[in-house]
Amino acid sequence: MTASLGLLRKLSLAGALVAASCAHTPAAPGTAPTSPQPPRGSSPAAEARPRTVATQTYSAQQAQAGEPLFAAHCGFCHGRDAMGGETGPDLTRSALVAEDVRGDKIGPVVHNGRPEKGMPPLNLSTGDVAAIVAFLHAQKTKAESNQGSRRSVEEGDLQTGDAEAGRRYFEGPGGCSKCHAPSGDLAGVADRLKGLELLQRMLYPSPRSGAGSPATATVTLKSGEIVKGRLAYRDEFTIAVRDGSGTYRSWPASEVTFTVDNPLDAHAAQLAKYTDEDVHNVLAYLQTLHK
Ligand code: HEC
Ligand code: HEC
């Protein structure tokens, strides 16, 4: 694991920055975004956390081992403390986590991801997943006992990189040039996306809402028939594709074999490889790509 934790910690607090920057006024840490305010009581934070269904005990070591793993593989999106980030939900409030018993629900989500919803499948060992599960249950218990206050992150924290080093990383070890060109698809990316939004897209560009997943799937049925198409849906139980004629076809995942080819896999794999410095540098480089 190479990703250091400083930026990850800040990213976990990043939701607050987005709220602040959307309001276009400098907001004090902890200040709620300005209008429109959700009706009282309807914000997720106002709802009671679903209670853990089966009490489980984990050793302190297990939960501790899970913390850096969670930060490296999940913290970008769910927040380093699992309480929600810019793209991933607060897992201490998740009904699925509440119903989980020793990874029986969390494990399959990690393994399969929810690619069309912005969560990539993550290829982790059974031991790592067990430690992450222990950490999540510990965080949930902690969250139930105290309402931790969230801190804010300054936009300035995102502006500390070295653009030239970022360019070298982009063209060299990052392998970004295999798919992107600064004067091609990424021309003007700095005009289109700013600050945290650019950072989020750079880390894991989940399909924009409305746009389908860029993934394709090849499904082999029991009869031997092979169906290829755009991945239309996938969760722990179901796989569906839209075939060449546009027809939606779905199967129970346990009754077919399938492979999924997702051009965003490179981004998912990159999440664990970036150091803090690389992230800052590449971001600084992308911020120079004006039209
Ligand atoms: C690139 C962003 C991203 C990463 C990395 C990521 N997730 Fe997620 N995760 C999401 C999003 C987005 C959802 C919500 C999907 C949906 O709406 O169904 C989600 C959903 C989940 C859920 C289901 C919550 C529920 O109530 O349905 C669990 C559990 C979960 N993630 C755990 C993890 C764990 C553990 C890791 C790391 C091993 C991880 N995620 C990594 C983005 C991410
Ligand atoms: C295997 C191909 C591949 C590699 C390698 C790759 N990307 Fe991407 N990247 C994609 C795809 C696919 C998208 C989604 C395109 C879209 O939705 O507009 C994307 C989107 C992006 C976006 C968002 C662009 C936008 O207009 O919203 C940024 C920024 C980005 N990648 C940066 C990087 C960086 C930095 C690296 C190297 C560390 C990298 N990518 C490596 C395939 C790749």
Image (cartoon, helix red, strand yellow):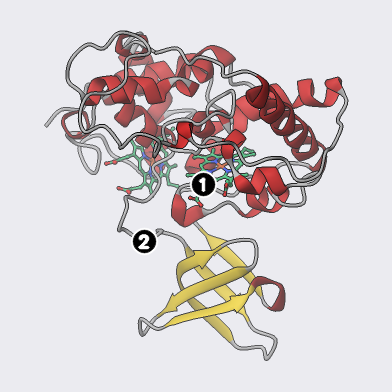
Q: Is mark 1 within 8 Å of ligand 1?
A: yes
Pinpoint residue 286: horizontal percent, then vertical percent: 28, 26
Q: Is residue 263 visible?
A: no
The amino acid on which the numbered mark 2 sits, given as a three-letter code, is Gly
The alpha-carbon separation of the residues under discs 2 and 1 comes to: 14 Å
Q: Is mark 2 within 8 Å of ligand 2?
A: no
Q: Secondary structure at mark 1?
A: loop
Residue drawn at the location 84% of the way across and 37% of the way down: 56
Residue drawn at the location 88% of the way across and 25% of the way down: 59
Q: Earlier in the sequence, mark 2 or mark 1?
A: 1
**Crowdedness near tag 1: few (<14), some (14–19) or many (≥20) residues, C-alpha within 10 Å:** some
Pinpoint residue 37: horizontal percent, then vertical percent: 26, 32
Q: How many marks?
A: 2
Q: Secondary structure at mark 2?
A: loop
Quarter of the image where the C terminus is located: top left
Q: Are marks 2 and 1 in contact (CB under 8 Å)?
A: no
Q: Residue furthest bottom?
A: 223
In terms of depth relative to the viewer, which is nearer, 224 or 20? 20
In what quadrant does ligand 1 lie? top right
Q: Which residue is mark 1?
A: 119
Left or right, 52 with respect to 10, comes to right
The amino acid on which the numbered mark 1 sits, given as a three-letter code, is Met
Q: Is residue 283 visible?
A: yes
Task: State whether residue 14 is above or below residue 255.
Answer: above
Residue 218, quarter of picture: bottom right
Pinpoint residue 51: horizontal percent, then vertical percent: 68, 40
Q: Which residue is mark 2?
A: 212
Pinpoint residue 104: horizontal percent, then vertical percent: 77, 51
